[in-house]
């Protein structure tokens, strides 16, 4: 279906994804690629409204299954209103989080059955998947400290215990090892410029685009 490319950044809290989304978008624009950056949950008006329900309030506000459903409702909006139209126009799309976050957070983190999440994925996504997924791996303490220092609210998930964050970190690593043709894990503890250079090199190699 699509002419553009779809790149997703995934990982735990405070791994620096959002900064790197913008740096990669700028690097791609420098080579005249038309690119948009977006995020999940969010990236379309209705999806941003759902985001507010998910990222604020008491940690036990939603059941794990409700969380998975809300994320997939937001994703359906995001795909239909933002991602698919952009790809059809030939734009590249970089999304700060996508479907792997639901498997890692609600599946590995909260224990929603993997098969149930696979069914949601198949109902909402069909065969659609990212061309490339970069998984930011970082020690929990560093990530949660960085995320806390941002202090912008939206911290409902940050407040979920250490065990939850460790499970989702391992979940992302497992997802990456199961789909090596789509996923690359990077060490997010390096400096912003070092991580950006690593990402440019992965994108060049995997998607055959000349980025220096
Ligand atoms: P952000 O902090 O990266 O913007 O993401 C918002 C939070 O939503 C983050 O703590 C991860 C969480 N999340 C899920 O739990 N499941 C999902 O499917 C997505 C996309 C995000």
Image (spheres, rainbow, N blue to C red):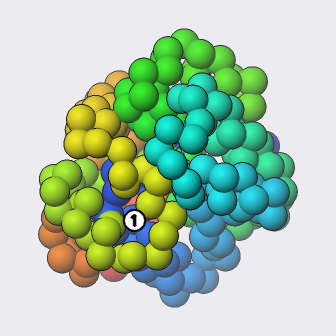
* Residue 76, quarter of the rendered image: top right
| Residue occupying the point 59% across, 61% down | 39
Q: Does mark 1's beta carbon lie closer than 8 Å to ligand 1?
A: yes
Instruction: Check the image and report above or below for 80 versus 39.
Output: above
Q: Nearer the viewer, residue 153 or 180?
A: 153
Residue 118 visible in image: yes
Instruction: Check the image and report above or below for 118 versus 79.
Output: above
* Residue 46, quarter of the rendered image: bottom right
Instruction: Check the image and report above or below for 165 versus 192.
Output: above
Q: Nearer the viewer, residue 108 or 194?
A: 108
**Could you say where residue 29 lies in the image, as x and y percent from the top left?**
56, 82
Rate crowding at label 1 as few (under 14), some (14 to 19) or many (20 or more) other CA atoms within 10 Å: many
| Residue occupying the point 19% across, 52% down | 140
Secondary structure beneath disc 1? Answer: helix
Q: Which residue is mark 1?
A: 17
Quarter of the N terminus within the rendering = top right
**Could you say where residue 125 lies in the image, as x and y percent from the top left?**
71, 33
| Residue occupying the point 59% across, 36% down | 62
Q: In the shown orientation, is residue 186 left or right of residue 4?
A: left
Quarter of the C terminus within the rendering = bottom left
| Residue occupying the point 43% across, 50% down | 157
């Amino acid at each position: 279906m699509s002419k553009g490319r779809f790149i997703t950044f995934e990982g735990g809290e405070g791994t620096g994804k959002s900064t790197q989304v913008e740096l990669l978008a700028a690097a791609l624009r420098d080579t005249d690629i038309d690119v948009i950056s977006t995020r999940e949950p969010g990236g379309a008006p209705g999806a941003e409204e759902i985001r507010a329900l998910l990222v604020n309030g008491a940690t036990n506000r939603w059941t794990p299954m409700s969380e998975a459903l809300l994320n997939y409702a937001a994703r359906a909006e995001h795909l239909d209103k933002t991602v698919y139209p952009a790809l059809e126009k030939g734009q590249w799309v970089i999304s700060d989080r996508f479907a792997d976050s639901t498997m890692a957070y609600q599946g590995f983190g909260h224990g929603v059955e993997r098969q149930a999440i696979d069914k949601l994925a198949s109902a909402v996504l069909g065969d659609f998947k990212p061309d490339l997924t970069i998984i930011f791996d970082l020690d929990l303490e560093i990530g949660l400290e960085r995320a806390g220092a941002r202090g912008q609210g939206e911290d409902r998930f940050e407040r979920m215990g250490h065990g939850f964050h460790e499970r989702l970190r391992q979940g992302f690593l497992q997802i990456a090892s199961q789909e090596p043709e789509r996923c690359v894990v990077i060490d997010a503890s390096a400096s912003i410029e070092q991580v950006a250079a690593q990402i440019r090199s992965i994108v060049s190699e995997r998607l055959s685009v000349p980025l220096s």
